[in-house]
Image: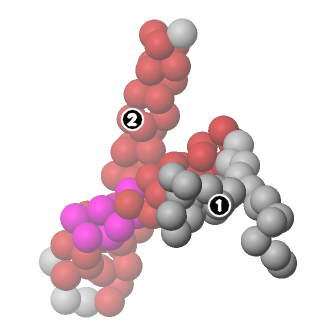
């Protein structure tokens, strides 16, 4: 590659560009659906982490016997279902009132 060739993202040599080269531009197209999937995946990961840390772990450690622990973990799934329902209703309300 010679200096005479012009590349995207770089300046042609001239009096004002004394050794200054711009960073190359990357045109990685990210669609709105990709952003939606990324935000949804992040919300799911954070939500499950909060559920495990604040609901499942205390329910599990509150009991000593294995059968009681399993029952407490199973019953905590109802709490998770309620939280998911609240999130869905809140999301639907936001969509309804937003647009």
Compared across the picture, whether 7 is left or right of 79 comes to right
Q: Position of residue 1 (x, y in %)?
A: 83, 78
Say whether marks 2 and 1 touch (CB < 8 Å). Answer: no
**Label annotation for residue 48:** none
Q: Nearer the viewer, mark 2 or mark 1?
A: 1
Number of other residues with Cα within 10 Å of mark 2, as a class: few under 14, some 14 to 19, many 20 or more: few
- Residue in the foreground of this view, choosing between 32 and 27: 27
Tell whether 42 sits left or right of 49. right
What is the crowding at mark 1: few (fewer than 14 residues within 10 Å), some, or many (at least 20)?
Answer: some
Name the spot of residue 71 as percent of width and height, x first: 36, 73
> Image point 51% across, 64% down: which residue?
18
How many numbered tags mark residues here?
2
Residue 92 located left or right of residue 76: right
> Regarding mark 2 in the picture, which secondary structure is present there?
helix
Report helix, strand or loop for mark 1: loop
Q: Does any portion of residue 42 appear in the rendered image?
A: yes
Which residue is at 54% across, 10% downward?
A: 99
The secondary structure that dominates the magenta segment is helix
Q: Is residue 81 above or below residue 12?
A: above
Drawn side of residue 75 relative to residue 39, left or right? left
Q: Measuring 45% from the left and 63% from the top, which residue is drawn there?
A: 45
Where is 38 relative to 1, above or below?
A: above
Residue matched to label 2: 86
Residue beneath the point at 48% across and 34% down:
88
- Whether residue 44 is visible here, answered yes or no, is no
Mark 1 sits on what residue?
Answer: 13
Separation of marks 2 and 1 at Cα, in angstroms:
60 Å
Q: 58 or 34, which is in the foreground?
A: 34
Where is residue 60 shown, x and y percent of the image?
Answer: 26, 78
């Amino acid at each position: 590659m010679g200096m005479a060739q012009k590349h995207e993202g770089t300046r042609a040599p001239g009096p004002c560009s004394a050794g200054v080269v711009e960073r190359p531009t990357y045109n990685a197209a990210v669609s709105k659906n990709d952003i939606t999937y990324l935000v949804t995946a992040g919300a799911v990961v954070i939500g499950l982490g909060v559920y495990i840390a604040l609901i499942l772990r205390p329910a599990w450690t509150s009991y000593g016997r294995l059968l009681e622990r399993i029952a407490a973990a199973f019953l905590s799934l109802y709490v998770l279902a309620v939280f998911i329902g609240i999130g869905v209703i809140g999301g639907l309300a936001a969509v309804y009132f937003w647009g």
